[in-house]
Image (cartoon, rainbow, N blue to C red):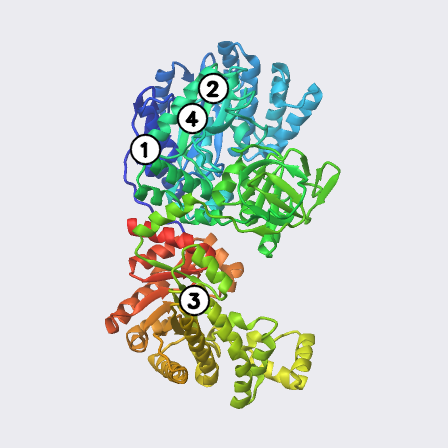
């Protein structure tokens, strides 16, 4: 359900060009990123083809009024076209000297390839003759016209580009050439007639010849593309609101396909994969921009090698270097540039903040501080928190000896193994069923976004480091190898050939985006080393944040990993996870099926040394830091088998009657485990379970403290809904702890608190706080109980809610501020009103979500707790929350 958006301006069209501009970089919300930046480049004297921008508010109006426009827009566009004609000296639709334009999208945030573009607009059967006459280059003119027919028919008229590609391939075959640029003017003119016949056959009408009709058709198509499936998916992945809309940029065409003194390219002011301070880019001679980003031809580097722009057009390259340096200095950030060279003259079509990997983002931020371009606060705000996860991506274990079957371009770092899929549909199906998928395509297109989203890595046989696959993969933090030319992919057959080797759909491969290598089979990986740039950057983040960051960890290994990533303690140690080892699960099961307290205690006595050892390891790993240990939480049936053969095997090992075991399992089964016999309800009905766990905690803490470590245990009671429950549990815990400490003749400081995950506990938090030293909000269960949703409902109906706008986002991924968040905030206020020293934290998965971390900072929590590999994410999100 789209929100109604109030307009902030009564001006719908903004002009730029020839030193004149009506906009600037600070108007991104109104002009979109592209419109704001071309206006800004014009303002500072960068050579930009003139044009005008139709604002994002018109897109909003278009969506809210069934495809109609504000009354004044048609006149505003006519006036802007007239102004453009006066600036350029050509007339739009003129048969003798036509003005041609591009029509491009431009949202506030970069969404590469997700919305539509139309180039060479204004060509028809008559104006193409005028273009021939003016340029004296019939091949160029007819190449531009055939491109226009194909692009416009696809974007505006809904004629699949595949029909045109078939005609183009046939034309190449007839001519005996393997590249489009080898077709001569006569062959292209014949192809144009074939293209127009395709349009007539598939659209049911002729290709439009009126330039004005073409323009308005393209404008509407760009606005409609804001709601294309690929754009909607991309926004959902990145959290961009549907209400933003896109601007439309109408810009004078400049041509990179007029001959060998023409070119088109994409460049970054620094390496977007590594962050190295090195001008990086790719270009094609005699081409248009879509050829580079679509991966149709494999481009050449702009510098450093024979055939580069630097060697082929040294004057143009020197000018491009001057421009990129000016732009990076002006924007104080790494820029992504699109440029065209027309007859030796350089034009900039776009600049934007370049998408980069997490490692590159950190390195660029740190080095720009060292270069006095930005300060430390700006550096901290410059990196997206979720990008830090990319720095923790695994790499292939260097001790493993394996030969790569192929090598492409290292487009986005990391290593991943999975089953290869050549189809987006199959990749999505495999990914949603829990399989690791490597999406392999000849080249990716914006329509592939859902397959790219579920894949753990992306592999293409064509395209360069600035292709669609490379740019989108870097933005998503996916491992990517592009331009692996040795691999011939046949998507229809579901196979790929590499030399003599044949890969079939579902075969396992490993790709390494850091080196560009591809291997057959699944290879082991290791965690990367974190470099000095990372530690310096995180040190700055820690200086500014006020919110503590702990980890959810159940083993000494996880605790050590989290501490290496900067965790300041454990916010959730789930004791039930310690029960599932092969050496102890049957002991736990013996305890569960016991019919008397004595039998349960006998089994628990066997469990005691196991748990004590676990806690000792965790306490040692967290020396000096707090460790919150949650007492047994899940319902007991989760520890028992369901399969008949497994039940009978267990009965044999436990030496019990199978019928008795089956009856016990049936009696423990929960229809809705979230609401069943679990949490503190277990401790109330079987207090000996919690007593043994408390004994293990206190004995372990005393043992580790005796060895000189500083131990700070926090014992947490789960699923409390009332003060009376917690009061009883607190008395059991304190009494057992007192017995252990008396027996050991020692003392120990520890805390007793509860997990707030039942709405009633939040509502009566002032009463519950009287018995608690701390609250830890278990937002996973609190979300389930507040909404009445299950976490398993995502595949059932939550996706439908999201698609229809009934929810702003998945409440299990980012905290629901209005409902669940309101309960958490109320509980904090009521709890501290009773107990001003009450410690407050959150330990659900929301603790690693940046938006949820910001919420936790705003309501004054003491800490968040998240999985070990999200600790750096939470640290940075907390810093950015403090900096605003």
Question: Which labelled disc corresponds to residue 572?
Answer: 3
Give the residue pinned by disc 1.
25
Place of residue 264 in the rendered image (x, y in percent of width and height, measured from the top left): 50, 23
Q: Residue furthest right?
A: 500
Q: Which of 218 and 599 is in front in this view?
A: 599
Give the residue pinned by disc 2.
341
Name the secondary structure under disc 3: strand
Between the C-alphas of marks 2 and 4, the distance is 10 Å
Tell me, yes or no, whether the two marked residues, 2 and 4, touch with CB atoms within 8 Å. no
Between the C-alphas of marks 3 and 1, the distance is 45 Å
**Position of residue 737 in the picture relative to residue 480 (left or right):** left
Question: Which labelled disc corresponds to residue 389?
Answer: none
Is residue 835 depicted above or below 376 in this figure? Answer: below
Q: Quadrant of residue 660?
A: bottom right
**N-term mark: 3 or 4:** 4
Name the secondary structure under disc 2: strand
Name the secondary structure under disc 4: strand
**N-term mark: 1 or 4:** 1
Between the C-alphas of marks 1 and 4, the distance is 15 Å
Tell me, yes or no, whether the two marked residues, 3 and 4, touch with CB atoms within 8 Å. no
**N-term mark: 2 or 3:** 2
Q: In which quarter of the image is residue 830?
A: bottom left
Q: Nearer the viewer, mark 3 or mark 4?
A: 3
Question: Which labelled disc corresponds to residue 349?
Answer: 4
């Amino acid at each position: 359900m789209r929100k109604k958006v109030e307009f902030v301006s009564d001006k719908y069209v903004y002009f730029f060009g020839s030193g004149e501009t009506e906009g600037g970089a600070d108007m991104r919300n109104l002009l979109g990123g592209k419109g704001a930046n071309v206006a800004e480049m014009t303002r500072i004297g960068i050579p930009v083809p003139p044009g005008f921008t139709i604002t994002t508010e018109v897109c909003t109006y278009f969506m809210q009024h069934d495809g109609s426009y504000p009354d004044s827009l048609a006149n505003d566009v006519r006036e802007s076209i007239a102004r453009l004609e006066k600036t350029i000296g050509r007339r739009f639709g003129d048969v003798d000297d036509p003005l041609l334009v591009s029509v491009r999208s431009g949202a506030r945030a970069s969404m590469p390839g997700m919305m539509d573009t139309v180039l060479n607009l204004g060509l028809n059967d008559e104006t193409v003759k005028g273009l021939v006459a003016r340029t004296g280059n019939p091949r160029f003119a007819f190449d531009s016209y055939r491109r226009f027919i194909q692009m416009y028919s696809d974007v505006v008229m809904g004629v699949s580009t595949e029909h045109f590609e078939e005609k183009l391939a046939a034309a190449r075959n007839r001519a005996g050439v393997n590249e489009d640029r080898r077709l001569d003017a006569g062959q292209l003119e014949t192809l144009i007639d074939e293209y127009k016949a395709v349009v007539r056959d598939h659209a049911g009408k002729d290709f439009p010849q009126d330039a004005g009709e073409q323009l308005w058709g393209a404008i509407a198509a760009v606005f409609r593309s804001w709601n294309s499936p690929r754009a909607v998916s991309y926004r959902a992945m990145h959290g961009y609101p549907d209400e933003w809309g896109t601007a439309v940029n109408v810009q004078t065409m400049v041509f990179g396909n007029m001959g060998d003194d023409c070119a088109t390219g994409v460049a970054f002011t620094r390496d977007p994969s590594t962050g190295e301070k090195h001008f990086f880019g790719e270009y094609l001679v005699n081409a248009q921009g879509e050829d580079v980003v679509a991966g149709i031809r494999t481009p050449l580097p702009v510098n450093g090698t024979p055939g580069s722009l630097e060697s082929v057009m040294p004057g143009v390259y020197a000018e491009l270097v001057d421009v990129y340096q000016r732009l990076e200095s002006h924007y104080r950030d790494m820029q992504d540039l699109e440029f065209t060279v027309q007859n030796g003259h350089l034009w900039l079509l776009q600049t934007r903040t370049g998408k980069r990997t997490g490692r590159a983002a950190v390195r660029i931020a740190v080095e720009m501080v060292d270069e006095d371009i930005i300060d430390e606060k700006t550096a901290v705000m410059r990196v997206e928190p979720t990008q830090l996860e990319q720095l923790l991506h695994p790499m292939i274990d260097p001790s493993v000896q394996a030969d790569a079957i192929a090598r492409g371009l290292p487009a986005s770092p990391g290593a991943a193994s999975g089953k290869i899929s050549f189809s987006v549909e199959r990749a999505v199906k495999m990914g949603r069923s829990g399989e690791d998928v490597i999406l392999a395509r000849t080249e990716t297109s914006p329509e592939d976004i859902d397959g790219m989203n579920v894949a753990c890595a992306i592999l293409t046989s064509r395209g360069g480091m600035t292709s669609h696959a490379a740019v989108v993969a870097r933005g998503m933090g996916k491992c990517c190898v592009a331009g692996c030319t040795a691999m011939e992919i046949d998507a229809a057959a579901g196979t790929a050939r590499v030399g003599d080797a044949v890969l079939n759909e579902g075969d396992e491969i490993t790709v390494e985006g850091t080196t560009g290598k591809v291997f057959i089979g699944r290879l082991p990986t290791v965690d990367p080393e974190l470099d000095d740039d990372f530690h310096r950057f995180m040190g700055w983040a820690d200086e500014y944040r006020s919110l503590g960051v702990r980890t959810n960890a159940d083993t000494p290994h996880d605790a050590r990993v989290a501490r290496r990533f900067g965790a300041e303690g454990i916010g959730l140690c789930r004791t039930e996870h310690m029960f599932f080892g092969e050496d102890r699960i049957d002991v736990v099961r013996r305890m569960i099926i016991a019919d008397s307290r004595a039998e349960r205690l006998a089994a628990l006595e066997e469990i005691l040394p196991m748990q004590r050892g676990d806690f000792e390891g965790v306490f040692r790993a967290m020396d000096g830091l707090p460790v919150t240990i949650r007492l047994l939480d899940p319902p007991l049936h989760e520890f028992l088998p369901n399969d008949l053969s497994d039940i009978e095997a267990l009965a044999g090992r436990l030496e019990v009657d199978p019928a008795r075991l089956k009856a016990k399992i049936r009696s423990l089964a929960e229809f809705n485990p979230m609401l069943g016999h679990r949490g503190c309800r277990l401790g109330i009905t079987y207090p000996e379970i919690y007593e043994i766990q408390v004994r293990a905690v206190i004995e372990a803490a005393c043992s580790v403290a005796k060895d000189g470590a500083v131990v700070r245990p926090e014992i947490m009671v789960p699923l409390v809904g009332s003060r009376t429950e917690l009061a009883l549990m607190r008395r059991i815990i304190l009494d057992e702890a007192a017995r252990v400490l008396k027996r050991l003749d020692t003392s120990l400081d520890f805390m007793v608190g509860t997990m707030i995950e039942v709405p009633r506990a939040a509502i009566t938090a002032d009463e519950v706080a009287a018995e608690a030293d701390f609250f830890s909000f278990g937002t996973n269960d609190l979300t389930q109980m507040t909404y009445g949703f299950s976490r398993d409902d995502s595949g059932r109906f939550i996706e439908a809610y999201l698609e229809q706008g009934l929810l702003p986002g998945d409440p299990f991924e980012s905290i629901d501020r209005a409902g669940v968040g309101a309960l958490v905030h109320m509980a904090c206020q009521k709890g501290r009103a009773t107990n001003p020293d009450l410690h407050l934290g959150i330990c659900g998965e929301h603790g690693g979500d940046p938006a949820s971390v910001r919420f936790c900072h705003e309501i004054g929590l003491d800490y968040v707790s998240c999985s070990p590999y999200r600790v750096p994410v939470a640290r940075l999100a907390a810093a950015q929350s403090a900096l605003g």
